[in-house]
Amino acid sequence: MKLILLLMLFTSAGKFQSDKVYVCRSGSSYAYHNRLCQGLRKCTHRIDTVTVREAMTTGHKKPCGYRY
Ligand SMILES: [Zn+2]
């Protein structure tokens, strides 16, 4: 219940937090990508589409080095 309220809060908090990004589910991945960029093509694991906030809570704390 609380989680749903929080999600609604974050979704309406701003475009940045709810933007969809891509993350590579490898253990060493630390960045998120906003589309299938050069860095993401190296990913040999599962690629998930998540929000920026979800990416950050799973350890992908910064935009990828290829500047999208
Ligand atoms: Zn990237």
Image (cartoon, helix red, strand yellow):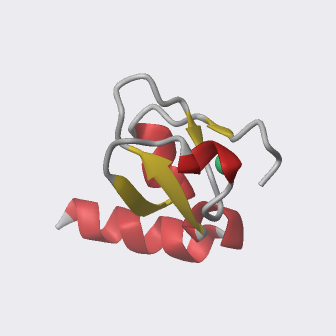
Q: Residue at x 41, y 74 (%)?
A: 8
Among all residues in the image, which is located at the extreme top? 28
> Where residue 50 appears, x then y in whole percent?
44, 62
> Which quadrant of the structure image shows residue 16?
bottom right
Considering depth in this image, is 38 or 65 the residue closer to the camera? 38
> Where residue 14 appears, x then y in whole percent?
67, 70
Considering depth in this image, is 27 or 52 the residue closer to the camera? 27
> Where residue 63 appears, x then y in whole percent?
70, 43
Q: How many marks?
A: 0
Among all residues in the image, which is located at the extreme right? 67
Q: Quadrant of the C terminus?
A: bottom right
Left or right of residue 36, residue 27 in this image: left
Left or right of residue 15, residue 58 in this image: left
Q: Is residue 42 above or below residue 3?
A: above
Q: Residue at x 38, y 59 (%)?
A: 48
> Which quadrant of the structure image shows residue 2?
bottom left
> Where residue 22 appears, x then y in whole percent?
51, 58
Q: Is residue 5 above or below residue 41?
A: below
Left or right of residue 1, residue 42 in this image: right
Q: Quadrant of the N terminus?
A: bottom left
Q: Residue at x 36, y 33 (%)?
A: 26
Considering depth in this image, is 52 or 5 the residue closer to the camera? 52
Left or right of residue 59, residue 17 in this image: right
